[in-house]
């Protein structure tokens, strides 16, 4: 048996760090503050260039069209941003749903 099970049906969407972004926290590590979240980006939403100074980020696109550096990516794309590395801007061409992991607290600068 897995020691942690999260059912999306038991979770709620909450506002993300940018307008047009919502987060559903599936798991928060009690010691590191790391998170596993579903992220929903509204169509047309642009996230400015930013860094996560306290966590590495992995984002897997589950659905939608995501534009990054002039290229469009779709479901099945994995992005990785090492801690402290600037990334973005990103634009959701359609509604985008991603499964994202931060191995430390979610902070944005």
Image (cartoon, grey):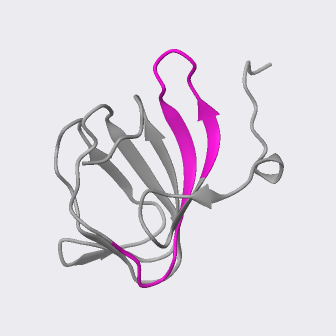
At 55% from the left and 39% from the top, the residue drawn is 36
Q: Nearer the viewer, residue 71 or 44?
A: 44
At 65% from the left and 41% from the top, the residue drawn is 26
Q: Is residue 55 above or below residue 22?
A: above
Is 72 positioned to the left or the right of 84 in the image? right
Report which quarter residue 72 is drawn in: bottom left
Q: Nearer the viewer, residue 84 or 18?
A: 18
Residue 20 position within the rendered picture, expressed as x and y whole percent measured from the top left: 49, 73
Residue 30 on the magenta span: yes
Residue 85 position within the rendered picture, expressed as x and y whole percent measured from the top left: 17, 44
Q: Which residues are magenta?
A: 24-46
Query: How many numbered discs sit on the rendered protein?
Result: 0
Is 62 positioned to the left or the right of 27 in the image? left
At 41% from the left and 84% from the top, the residue drawn is 44
Residue 1 position within the rendered picture, expressed as x and y whole percent measured from the top left: 80, 19
Q: Residue furthest top?
A: 31
Q: Is residue 32 above or below residue 9?
A: above
């Amino acid at each position: 048996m897995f020691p942690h099970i999260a059912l999306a049906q038991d979770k709620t969407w909450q506002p993300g760090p940018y307008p047009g972004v919502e987060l559903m926290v599936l798991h928060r590590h009690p010691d590191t503050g790391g998170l596993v979240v579903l992220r929903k980006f509204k169509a047309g939403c642009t996230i400015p260039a930013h860094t996560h100074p306290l966590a590495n980020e992995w984002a897997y696109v589950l659905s939608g069209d995501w534009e990054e550096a002039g290229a469009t990516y779709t479901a099945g794309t994995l992005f990785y941003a090492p801690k402290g590395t600037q990334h973005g801007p990103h634009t959701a061409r359609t509604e985008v749903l991603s499964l994202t992991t931060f191995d430390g607290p979610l902070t944005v600068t």
